[in-house]
Amino acid sequence: MRGTMLYGPRDIRFEDREAPTIIEPTDAVIRMAATCVCGSDLWPYRGLQPINGPTPMGHEYCGIVEEVGSAVKSVKPGQFVVGSFATSDNTCPYCQGGYQSSCMHREWISRAQAPVLRVSLADGTLVATPDVPSDDLVPSLLAASDVFGTGWFAADAANVKPGSTVAVVGDGAVGLCAVLAARQMGAERIIAMSRHESRRKLAHEFGATDIVIERGEEGVARIKELTGGIGADSVLECVGTQESMMQAIRSTRPGGYVSYVGVPHGVELNGEELFFAHIHLHGGPAPVRRFLPTLITLVWEGKVNPGKVFDLTLPLNQVAEGYRAMDERRAIKTLLRP
């Protein structure tokens, strides 16, 4: 089998790798229908997150179950499944509290940019679709495994309610899916922060009512202007930089909510500023497994189409070009077909 490996900054290779097999009785092996490149993959790709030698890549996946371990009961060979980037037993206290991405037995998926994937803790990680989907549904089901699930968590963690005013910081795939989630949760006004025409267009399609192109303090001032000096009820931070986090916090009204789902790099918060901001702050790795049944149903019934964030589709063996296109912002998100 061949799979994606990162050797160093901007050095992606698609090369021979050992094919996955059942190791533990709780494992499943799935044949990928599609995988993709994530915005978070760009941190190590750009050399901004260290790696320890050649590293297998990919954590977003959906496909057909080929084999299961003897202890697996919830899925079976032949079913189409979607899973989270974090495995979970779905029975430990953290899972039962709805935070499966902090499962006491969690493993991070890291080999999904390949034709076949082993998923540990299959019973608590994978969710089967009602049937094998038509090909047009596959991109949106794939999105549920991370970017749509993460965008949904951003809206949930920021307490988005019917009639509320929401601002989304970040116009990558997660930020766009956060716009979609906020619309599904009934937000009346959704302010998307974006400087890129194609992304602004998709944000509007997903439900954004306003676009702000300014960043930093100018972006904060613009949101305050749009909200009559008050600030947004909920601000969804979907980037992970110091600027984006401070922009989110300062755009939120007192008593409002900030969620942060972008993997943080170099983010530091000032305790005194937080104290007087009077905001709720909540985030982290999205517990996608909590939301998967709902997200799959929304996709299956045609109520949402988060797969539109994939604006470039390539064969899996051209994965290096998929990374380049996203790195150079020629693509929002690259879909890879084995």
Image: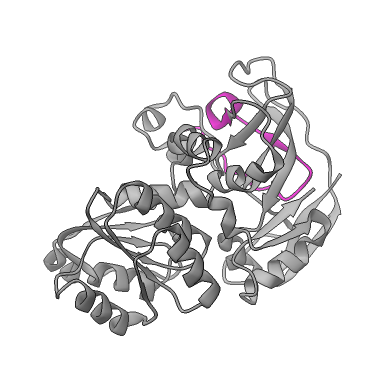
Report the front residue among 148 and 120: 148
Side of 3 relative to 118 (left or right): right
Residue 103 appearing in the image: no
Q: Is residue 182 left or right of residue 64?
A: left
Seen at 24% across and 81% down, the residue is 221
Q: Is residue 126 magenta?
A: yes
Left-right relation of 300 to 240: right
Rendered view: 330 above or below 38: below
Query: Which residue lies most toward the bottom here?
Result: 218
Q: Which residues are magenta?
A: 104-127
Which residue is located at x 57 percent, y 59 percent? Answer: 309
Q: Nearer the viewer, residue 169 or 7?
A: 169
For residue 45, say whether it is visible: yes
Which of the 4 quarters of the picture holds residue 77?
Answer: top right
- Where is residue 253 shown, x and y percent of the image? 17, 65
Residue 65 or residue 307, whichever sits in front: 307
Rendered location of residue 71, percent (x, y) = 63, 15
Task: Tell how many labels.
Answer: 0
Residue at (19%, 69%) from the top-left corner?
A: 231
Residue positioned 51% across, 27% down in the render: 89
Q: Is residue 333 magenta?
A: no
| Residue nearest the observer in this picture, 285 or 55 | 285
Against 260, is 227 above or below?
A: below
User: In the rendered image, which quarter contains the N terminus?
Assistant: top right
Q: Position of residue 12 (x, y in %)?
A: 76, 65
**Rendering colour mode:** one colour
